[in-house]
Amino acid sequence: MAILDSIIPFTGKLGNIISYKRNGKHCLRTKPEQVRQTANTRQAAKWFGAASRKGALIRSAITPELDIYPDSYLVNRLNSYIMKAGRNNHAGLKNFRFNGYTGLDKLFPQLPVFSKDGTLHIPAQRLEAYGNNYGTAKQMEVKLIATRIDFATRSITGTDAVVMTIDLEQPFNGAEMSIEVPGKGTLLVVVQVRQIGEDGDYRDRNWFAADIVAVVEDQQPEVSLAKNKSHKKLAGIPSMPPRKAASTQNRQAVNQRE
């Protein structure tokens, strides 16, 4: 790996040279002349492609509703999170952070809990107000985002969001927020929190967060099977009269007369 130090850096492929950006630096590497793939590497590449498509679908459903700036590593972090969770393990998406620097646990000592009836319960607690040289936060904005994704058809079937403001200058006695997104697919629930001062929200990545707090699978309706109706027992089949065995003459069957 070589580091590109020029006036006009580039990214992409130029002949057999590939330029890419890593940790804020432009790096160079050569393209291999031949790539040998085993069955395991092909399977890993296939799974990585599936995870990337799944991550892109989640980002397209949620990021338009966010009012914060996710970190620059969101794509790679989400893909890695999906691969670590395992294939079709949607519940493994819980606790993913769209801001990799801060989670809800910093802003809420007691985390909110989402119930299956569509209600977010925020326990009563003491909330810390962010402050800097320009002032101290006066309010905390809580945004509840819910989106329903049908991963089988790779489609977003519904999205909704509700917002609540908490006065940080008053004791917080707890609150509840409700949301409903009908439709088919898996429901992903995200809680976004940011602190707001007199001049607007603080653009400090250490004081805003957006985490997936719940994953609710689509409940398929149970199919009730009708009980088999009782049938009358059929009378026994009458036995057939015995027949005498046939003898053969010159390899042809001959019926004997009684």
Image (tube, grey):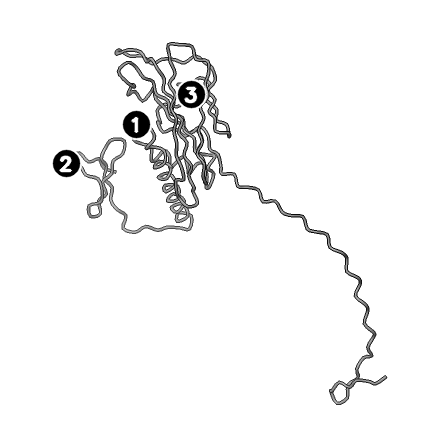
For marks 2 and 3, the one nearer the N-term is 2
Residue at mark 2 to residue at mark 1: CA–CA distance: 28 Å
For the residues bearing labels 2 and 3, Cβ distance under 8 angstroms: no
Residue at mark 3 to residue at mark 1: CA–CA distance: 18 Å
Q: Which residue is mark 3?
A: 105
Task: Give the crowd class for mark 3: few <14, some 14-19, many >=20 residues within 10 Å.
Answer: few
Residue 189 spot, x, y in % from top left: 43, 30
For the residues bearing labels 3 and 1, Cβ distance under 8 angstroms: no
Disc 2 vs disc 1: which is toward the camera? Answer: 1
Disc 2 vs disc 3: which is toward the camera? Answer: 3
- What quarter of the picture does the C terminus occupy? bottom right
- SS for tag 1? loop
Residue 12 spot, x, y in % from top left: 22, 42
Q: Which residue is mark 1?
A: 69
Amino acid type, mark 3: Asp
Q: Is residue 42 above or below residue 137?
A: below
For the residues bearing labels 2 and 1, Cβ distance under 8 angstroms: no
Q: Is residue 50 above or below residue 94?
A: below
Residue 82 spot, x, y in % from top left: 41, 37
| Quarter of the view holding residue 169 | top left
Amino acid type, mark 1: Tyr
Task: Please report the residue visible at 35 percent of the width from the left and 39 percent of the height from the top.
Answer: 56
Task: Please report the residue visible at 32 percent of the width from the left and 26 percent of the height from the top.
Answer: 67
Residue 90 spot, x, y in % from top left: 46, 37
- SS for tag 2? loop
Residue at mark 2 to residue at mark 3: CA–CA distance: 42 Å
- SS for tag 3? helix
| Quarter of the view holding residue 247 | bottom right
Report the front residue among 248 and 58: 58
